[in-house]
Amino acid sequence: MSDNTTPLLLSAQVKTAVEYYLAQLEGDDTTNLYDLVLAQVEKPLLEVSLQHAGYNQTKTAEMLGISRSTLRKKLAHYNLL
């Protein structure tokens, strides 16, 4: 970065977001937190990766380290096709 600031690690951003989410529950129980977090992270990951690769699914799959067929299934699941 050109302004000499240290970027916040992705893991730190996720941790902060999950802590914030749990704090908003004010002691109420939650279920399926794992699936919730994965779904909330996976869709924007796919969107940004696809855009970065110029909407080339082969390049996107390579960038993500998954097969093109897996990518297509995930894109269909999130209605991104």
Image (cartoon, rainbow, N blue to C red):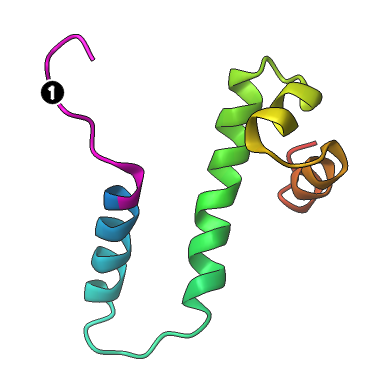
Q: Is residue 13 magenta?
A: no
Label tally: 1
Crowd class of label 1 (few under 14; some 14 to 19; many from 20; radius 10 Å): few
Q: Is residue 16 left or right of residue 50?
A: left
The image quarter containing residue 68 is: top right
Q: Is residue 3 magenta?
A: yes
- Rendering coords of residue 61 (x, y %): 74, 33
Viewer-side residue, 18 vs 68: 68
Q: Is residue 55 above or below residue 12?
A: above
**Residue occupying image coordinates x 73% and y 22%:** 59
Q: Is residue 54 left or right of residue 4?
A: right
Q: Is residue 9 above or below residue 35?
A: above
**Residue occupying image coordinates x 56% and y 30%:** 48
**Residue occupying image coordinates x 60% and y 29%:** 49
Q: Quadrant of the N terminus?
A: top left
- Rendering coords of residue 58 (x, y %): 80, 25
Q: Quadrant of the C terminus?
A: top right
The image quarter containing residue 24 is: bottom left
Q: Which residue is farthest right? A: 69
**Residue occupying image coordinates x 51% and y 56%:** 40
Q: Is residue 59 above or below residue 41?
A: above
Q: Main secondary structure of the magenta part?
A: loop
Which amino acid type is shown beneath numbered disc 1? Thr
Q: Which residue is farthest left? A: 4
For the record, the magenta segment spans 1-11
- Rendering coords of residue 10 (x, y %): 35, 44
Viewer-side residue, 48 vs 66: 66
**SS at badge 1:** loop
- Rendering coords of residue 76 (x, y %): 81, 47
Q: Is residue 48 above or below residue 67?
A: above
Q: Which residue is mark 1?
A: 5
Q: Which residue is farthest top? A: 2
